[in-house]
Image (cartoon, rainbow, N blue to C red):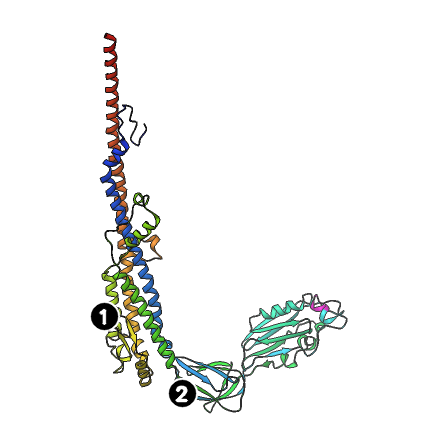
Amino acid sequence: MSSVGGTYGLSGSGMDIDSIVKSLMTSQQAKADALLQKKTVTEWQKAAYNTVYDDINAFRTTVFNFKLQSTLSPNKVTSSNTSVATVTAMSDAADVNHSLVVTQLAGGVNLTSSATITAVGAPDKLNIGNQIYGGTAPTGLYKFTISNGGESKEITVDPTKSINDLVSQINSAGVNVKASYDSTLDRFFMSTTNTGSSAEIKIVNDAANDASWGADFFVEKLKLPAEVSTTGKTGKDAEFTLDDVPLTQANNSFSISSVTYNLTGVSATPVNISVTNDTDKAVASIQSLVDSYNKILADINGKMNETRYKDFPPLTDAQKSVMKEADITAWELKAKSGMLHNDSTLASLVNSMRSAFSNPVTGSTPPYNTGSSIGITTGAYTEGGKLTLDTDKLRTALQANPDVLNQLFGSTGTDFNSQGIAGRLYDGIKTKMDQVAQIAGTTGGAQYDIKSNFAKKIAAYNLQISSQADRFDVVQKAYYKKFNAMEVALKQLSSQSSWLNSFGTTSQ
């Protein structure tokens, strides 16, 4: 019979050597299984920490928004006539009413051929010479300089190229002028992409141009307004009065004192622009923060309070092979439970989060210098530190001090006491994230993690497992070697016995 350790059974002893060796290797297998189970638990704990890292990092991103004035001091802006102007406002815009009268909208320059430009009896439209000049096409090049304010570009027109090539040359000149040709209308169009009195289209023809092009190709042949090649044609500014002060702007969209106006029409009667604190939006923002806080708190408390079943170690392959799938699932559910039970790092994180709301913010205007002063309080002990928000109390605080949230949450102090609540949470979470990363690395870097505490533990277990596997092979081979020797001896003894027996039979 063949075996891992050699050939045996020739003696006819009837012993099951494999079973005997397997039984003798039980203690060695137990050592190997124990190491693998410890490694598996460590990997589960590492993965649990990685999940926590991702969760608190996501919450930290949410907290960042509550360091911003736009979140803490939202404004509500209205226009009494949106056909004349629509408005938005930055968070630092003053809560006032403005009077606006728009007398002129800003505009750029728009030029259109006054008539069709293709010559009567033109042989084709494949090139400018044939299309515009008919049978008397110019033969030389035509040069001109197109300018818009401080930008200008010299362009050369080849009479053998099409009018669409001229369009492309103008569009790529980099002077904020766009051209187009409509073959159905047979007209040429030019316009500025900028607006205001500084917007301009001016064409200066090269004096050396061949006379066959005519005195002014753009005016005579493309039939654009005459001023395009004399004084140039300019755009116009938006003209309006704001709170009885005459003003101009180059664009119809502009910002003044943190209010952005988008002019859409003119009106002789004043348009009322109202900027007020958006209390409803502010309350909704704080409620969303409280909800996010409670969610991450519940997740962390759940991990710390999860029962650890130490009598349910990870299953070995041998154990799984004799179990039903449902039993394996139920077992592993308990085996993986409580990986972060009563974890001190998570407990410290919860305490720091709680203190961010409870400790007074120095520099805030009393009496609104703590979370509880504006209605954010901690529930009963049995709720694990869950926050509740009294929205009526928060509204009262906002009415008394519209900047209360900015002072209480957004304050940028140099230490914990002078920092706002959002800054405390943001920095405190980062500190714990760094600790978690040192303990177990991060999900994103798990593949390359060799420096975290758990990565080092797993590496150490791998070495022990490898060493134990080598030890297992050595011991197992030694057992088989002994049993093989025994089989050989038994075989020899059996042969001698048979010889002796045959000798005795012959002598009779």
Q: Residue at x 25, y 83 (%)?
A: 367
Q: Type of residue at label 2?
A: Val
* Residue of label 1: 381
Which mark is first along the chain, 1 or 2?
2
Q: Residue 419, located in which quarter of the rendered image?
A: bottom left
Residue toward you, 301 or 329: 329
Q: Position of residue 319 (x, y in %)?
A: 30, 44
Residue toward you, 192 or 443: 443
Gap between marks 2 and 1, in whole Å?
A: 45 Å
Q: Which residues are magenta?
A: 124-130
Q: Secondary structure at mark 1?
A: helix
Is 237 placed left or right of 433 in the picture?
A: right
Q: Type of residue at label 1?
A: Tyr
Label pair 2/1, CB-CB below 8 angstroms: no
Q: Position of residue 266 (x, y in %)?
A: 54, 87
Q: Is residue 122 magenta?
A: no
Q: Is residue 411 visible?
A: no
Q: Residues within 10 Å of mark 2 (few under 14, many from 20)?
A: few
| Position of 442 relative to 91 (above/below) | above
Q: Residue at x 26, y 12 (%)?
A: 502
Is 222 placed left or right of 443 in the picture?
A: right
Q: Residue at x 26, y 54 (%)?
A: 453
Q: Position of residue 507 (x, y in %)?
A: 23, 7
Q: Which mark is residue 96?
A: 2
| Position of 64 relative to 269 (above/below) | above
Q: Quadrant of the N terminus?
A: top left
Q: Is residue 163 visible?
A: yes
Q: Position of residue 56 (x, y in %)?
A: 32, 64
